[in-house]
Amino acid sequence: MIDADLVDLKELASSRPANRYIIRLHFAASPIDRGGPRVFDVYAQDQLVCSNVTIDPSGTAQQRFSVQLLENISIADKLRLRFVPKKRQAALAGIEIVREP
């Protein structure tokens, strides 16, 4: 299991009650990755939000890259992401966090 460090969002949410956010998680196979597919689950705020995310470095473009859209995620001041591997470890390439209007 891989635990991402807590992301401090105090500048976005300060001490106010929890706000809702849209989060995009970007996953991509590395060009030097030859270990086979990566399969993992994603948890946000201790809730399962994506199951069996698969990134295959030897697959098609759609299999090598993935953007997972998480909507309506409640964050007061910290975002907790957890990646639970089923086959190899997860590799997060990027993250976008946008407060919902």
Image (spheres, grey):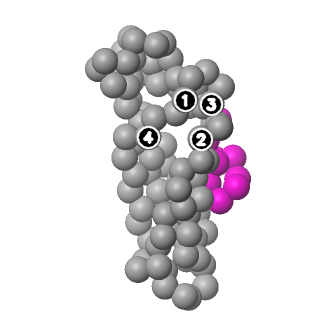
Q: CA distance from mark 4 to mark 3?
A: 12 Å
Residue identified by numbered label 4: 92
Q: Residue furthest bottom?
A: 16
- Which amino acid lies under the numbered mark 3 shown in the image of this protein? Pro
- Which amino acid lies under the numbered mark 4 shown in the image of this protein? Leu
Q: CA distance from mark 1 to mark 4?
A: 10 Å
- Which amino acid lies under the numbered mark 1 shown in the image of this protein? Gln
| Image location (x, y in percent) of residue 70 | 53, 53
- Residue 29 appears in view: yes
Q: CA distance from mark 1 to mark 3?
A: 5 Å
- Residue 71 appears in view: no
Q: Earlier in the sequence, mark 4 or mark 3?
A: 3
| Image location (x, y in percent) of residue 100 | 47, 71
The reply to whether the C-beta atoms of the residues labelled 1 and 4 are less than 8 Å apart is: no
* 41 left or right of 29 in image: right
Q: Please give the range of residues in magenta.
A: 42-51
The dot on residue 89 is: 1
| Image location (x, y in percent) of residue 18 | 60, 78
Q: CA distance from mark 4 to mark 2?
A: 11 Å
| Image location (x, y in percent) of residue 64 | 38, 23
Callout 2 secondary element: strand
Residue identified by numbered label 2: 2
Determine the residue positioned at 70% across, 55% down.
Answer: 46
The dot on residue 85 is: 3
Q: Earlier in the sequence, mark 3 or mark 2?
A: 2
Q: CA distance from mark 1 to mark 2?
A: 7 Å
Nearest to viewer (mark 3 / mark 2)? 2
The reply to whether the C-beta atoms of the residues labelled 3 and 2 are less than 8 Å apart is: yes
* 87 left or right of 33 in image: right
Nearest to viewer (mark 4 / mark 2)? 2
